[in-house]
Image (spheres, rainbow, N blue to C red):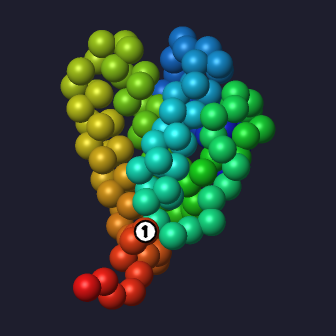
Amino acid sequence: MTAGELIAQVDALRPNQYALEQKLQWLQRLDGQIRLELEMTHETEMAEEPWEAYTADTELRAAFPYDTELYTAYLFCQIDLHNGEINRYNQSLALLSAAWRQMADSINRKQMPKGCGGWKL
């Protein structure tokens, strides 16, 4: 899924006043967290560095079936937080936490953490 496709879905579900560039920065930050906290801690092949500026055509890091729920909940959190809608933010954060946990659990089941291969005495 591309960043532009996701942002279009989020804007349809929760209309907001935030610019495309702001939402792209938020998505880039989440992809950076995915890389640092999940991918770099496991023995896996990683996609390109997420540090370059995102565009609407940038492919997001999280894979199906975790991508839509994770990124949607994250953008909802950012929108709600910046709008000062704390009750909505708490609900969005609960959805985000569940989506993150499901993706992290999937990665933990499929890939060996770095430094855990083999016996050490």
**91 or 43, nearer to the observer:** 43
Identify which amino acid the numbered label 1 is placed on: Lys
Task: Read off the residue under disc 1.
Answer: 114
Up-down relation of residue 24 to residue 111 (above or below)? above
Where is residue 38 shown, x and y percent of the image?
Answer: 44, 56
Q: Is residue 13 visible?
A: no
113 relative to 7 in the view: left or right = left
Up-down relation of residue 64 to residue 71 (above or below)? below
Tell me the residue at 42%/40% (across/down). Answer: 73
Mark 1 secondary-structure assignment: loop
**28 or 48, nearer to the observer:** 48
Tell me the residue at 41%/81% (across/down). Answer: 117
105 relative to 50 in the view: left or right = left
Up-down relation of residue 58 to residue 24 (above or below)? below
Mark 1 neighbour density, 10 Å: few (under 14) some (14–19) many (20 or more): few
Where is residue 82 shown, x and y percent of the image?
Answer: 38, 14
> For the C terminus, which image quadrant?
bottom left
Res. 5 image quadrant: top right
The outermost residue toward the front is 121
**109 or 16, nearer to the observer:** 109
